[in-house]
Every structure is written in structure tokens, then in C-alpha cells.
Amino acid sequence: MERIKIGISSCLLGNPVRYDGGHKLDHFLRDTLGQYVDYVPVCPEVECGMSVPREAMRLEGKPEAPRLMTRSTREDKTDMMMTWARKRVAQLEAEDLCGFIFKSDSPSSGMERVKVYDEKGMPAKTGIGIFARIFMEKFSLLPVEEEGRLHDAALRENFIERIFTLRRWREIRSMKSGRGALVDFHTRHKYLLLSHSTKHYQAMGKLVAGQKTMSLQELRSQYEAWLMEALKLKTTPKKNVNVLQHMMGYFKEQLSADEKKELLEILDHYQKGLVPLIVPVTLIGHYVRKYDQPYLKQQTYVNPHPLELQLRNHV
């Protein structure tokens, strides 16, 4: 797989571009995830022509259409920012991004709950950064997150799973193969999809199997929309246990009584929050190899992202 290209707020990589000349380096993003992705850094303020350091700014007015104002001199920077943002988003279309990581709380880049001040100077966390809004409207299917939310282990796992899956999907789309490659992708991602949404998996299966009248381009576009929609839904211990039990069914007749007992105990411990997901998945993977299950060997659910990221190690 080619390295994944991700957009990111420049300050999160340690670049000194913030209003006070500082940065907001995130070590996990730069040093750990950065081993597997190529970042495309973006600083809206600097790139649209503002200096470092610069006067602090905030959003004011209506949450759905706020103005970007400097705090002391009361300069309105909205049009300047929006004109630049539209041009930058058009340029980013050529980058083939698989996602974007925004700086939380930023009046330009926050993706949610950004403070918007009313006419009395009272803040409400109801806004979206100006650049972030334009970006998300343009790339509505792309995985996006904020660095603050990525400190949550479950949200981190979900976001990174989505960008790796989208990269695999992009590789399929770039191939000049027909519907067979789409069927193969859907087959390999069966259990990954089921861990998010049975409803989506079934609908996507019907789409792949039954839409002979659709053009390949239409079929791929619809499939991609449902793929991203499905993976955005959170997994749960209940969903994961259901998937692991389905996988266990492929070799349960080959398991010894002790092996079966151990596996069921570990599934129970996982569902009760006593051990992380990596424990039953590792054991299932062991039996997949031991009892040579070729169908399960190709399932991305067992290894959807690099083990070194330790995304399934949380309880």
C-alpha cells in the first residue's frame, strides 16, 4: 500500500505558526502516525497572508455564518480568509487526501464546538472554523478529526481505520479492473464492515451483486459513500464479539475443548471490559493460521492497520 496522504493543521507538526509565534506539536501525530502517512500541512492564517506573530482573532455573530474578527483592533478578516480557503480547497483536490486533522477550537480550523461570540460578547460553543467548514463541505466523505478528539482511544482507532480503508479503496478505484475488483474488496472487508453496521454491509452487498444496470463509475461512487458512512459508525464490544463468534464458526469443530473454552472466556472478558480487543483478535488470528482458513486470512478485520499503532490495546 502506498503511504497515506493526510491534510493537517500545520501547528500540530510543531511549526511555529500560531498567533503568538508558538506551536501545538502533537507527538503521536508527528512521531507515531507520521511513520505511516505523508502530511500536507495547512495554516489558514499564514497562508492567507497574516503574519507571525499576529493579533488574536475570534468568531462573532451568527454560528452558521460568523465573522472572523481581530480581538483588539476589530478588523474583519472574513472575506480574506474565505477567498483564500476556497482557492486552497480547490488546490487540495489534486492531493488525493485520505483525511484531515484539524486544530481544535481554532476560529479557522476547528471542526466543531468553536466559540462564537454574540453581540453582547458572550461565547457559545456552536461554531465551525471558516476553513474547516469550506473543506468539509467540499470533501464531505473524507474522514476528518481534531487533535483533541484523537486523544480519545476509540475515536483515534475509528479515524485511523477509516483512512487506511479509504487508501485501500482508492487503490481499487485506480485500477482499470471491473466489478470483480469491487466484489473482492467487499469480500475482504466483510467482517470489518459488520463490526460497524450489519445494515450497511447488507445494503452494500446487494449493491455489488445486483446493480448490473449501473455504470461502473456510478456503482463505485455509491459504494464509496456507503463505505465511508458505515465506517463512521462506532464499533462496540457487542458488535465485535458478534464478528469474532462468526469467525470462530469457521474452525469451531477443529478446536479442542480447552481451546474453545479459552476462546469463549476471552470473548466474555472482552465484552465485560476486562481485556482489550487486541487479545481476542490475536487469538482468533492464531487459530486462523493454525487451522488454515484461507477465507479468514484475507479478512482485513484481523489487521486493518499497523499493529505498531496499538489502536486496539485500549479497554
Image (tube, helix red, strand yellow):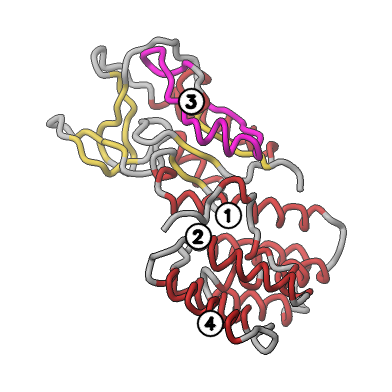
Of the image marks 4 and 3, the number of the one nearer the N terminus = 3
Q: Residue visible at 50% across and 63% down?
A: 277
Pointers 4 and 3 in contact (CB under 8 A)?
no
The one of 73 and 311 positioned closer to us in this rendering? 311
Question: Which corner quadrant holds the C terminus?
Answer: bottom left
Q: Which residue is mark 3?
A: 44
Tell me the crowding category of disc 4: few under 14, some 14 to 19, or many 20 or more residues within 10 angstroms, Cα based: few
Q: Which residue is mark 2?
A: 232
* Image location of residue 30, percent across then percent down: 55, 31
SS category of the residue bearing label 3: helix
Of the image marks 4 and 1, the number of the one nearer the N terminus = 1
Q: Which residue is mark 1?
A: 162
Of the image marks 2 and 3, the number of the one nearer the N terminus = 3
* Residue 65, numbered label: none
Examine the rendered structure and indicate whether residue 100 appears above or below residue 273. Answer: above
* Image location of residue 83, percent across then percent down: 50, 27
